[in-house]
Amino acid sequence: MMKNKKIYIAGHHGMVGSAIYRALQNNGYKNLVGRPSQELDLRNQAQVKDFFAFEKPDVVIDAAARVGGILANNNFPYQFLMENMQIQNNLIEASHQNEVEKFIFLGSSCIYPKLASQPLKEDCLLTSSLEPTNEWYAIAKITGVKACEAIRKQYKKDFVSLMPTNLYGTRDNFDLQTSHVLPAMIRKFHEAKKNKHAPVKLWGTGKPMREFLFVDDLADAVLFALENKLSHHLYNVGTGIDITIKELALKIQKITGHEGEIIWDNSKPDGTPRKLMDVSRLKNAGWKYKTSLDEGLQITYNWFLANQDNFKEVKI
């Protein structure tokens, strides 16, 4: 019966939203709704209220957010805090007021404390301080998780939050000023290869450990959450496997064919030392990732090669 429901995917043009849209289409969902930001500004409460009154969606998947890496978070703290709260608050409240049957909120593993025990369990939320390099985004996402939990507790509604680990994949952001570490590395190594295998400078020491999830696997987890009534309000989504940033760099260097030097800029911040997710809660519910990191990196690089003319030129 869920396949006949009207499902609104907020942020359906982004990497995550478009992957979810594809996954639902490929699984027989036909009544899908999406609006580009030019037509619907999710930061604008009046526009969101009018949209919900007109479309009357049965299900809402919130994949809309202002996102970016350490540099973007550091340069625009107010926007990362305020715009993300505006987007999610408008969607959550409109869904509540319009009796939406199911709401799936997507957050990030950065909601967990910087020095929490590894791997990160859902229960460690709000137990100590956040990583300063992305606390603005994290605080916004925490408020979204708690809002969904509050509605679930008070009104017994099926509002659930999924917290993915570091995502990557097709339609990723490869702009070096705003991108995350993995797509930024793909761009840097590729450009350096074209520039006679010039040296590639990377931030930090390369020692921090990170977990990476292919975006189509997250979309599959959203499909799972859509088709099942989950008993908890919060679930981690990841692989449960991490590698060092240096190991990631070597994998991407090999895939891109770059043969030059890698220079680590120790004056730049490393960010959180480790951020591995405990994914047992969702695994016990019946979901597990499918795409290995090597396979996902190759798919992502192939997509980058096919679409690189759409990216701005940058200097190495």
Image (tube, rainbow, N blue to C red):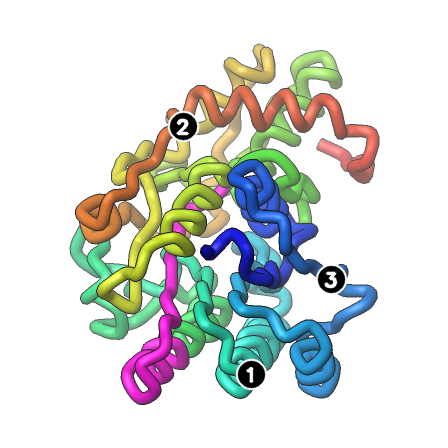
Amino acid at the residue labelled 2: Thr
Comparing 257 with 39, the one in front is: 39
Comparing 207 with 52, the one in front is: 52
First-in-chain label (3 vs 2)? 3
What residue is drawn where x is 73% and y is 83%?
50
Give the residues drawn in magenta, as a range: 146-167
Q: In the displayed structure, does residue 39 sit left or right of residue 289?
A: right
Q: In this view, does 135 lie above or below 94?
A: above
Q: What residue is shown with label 3?
A: 35
Amino acid at the residue labelled 1: Asn
Q: What residue is shown with label 1?
A: 98
Q: In this view, does 282 lie above or below 123?
A: above
Distance between the Cα atoms at labels 3 and 1?
A: 18 Å
Circle 3 — which element? loop
Q: What residue is shown with label 2?
A: 291
Circle 1 — which element? loop
Q: How crowded is mark 2: few (under 14 residues within 10 Å), some or many (20 or more)?
A: some
What residue is drawn where x is 39% and y is 53%?
227
Please state the horizontal and vertical placement of residue 52, each as a whole percent of the image: 66, 78
Q: Specify the quadrant that holds the C terminus.
A: top right
Q: In the displayed structure, does residue 57 sit left or right of residue 142?
A: right
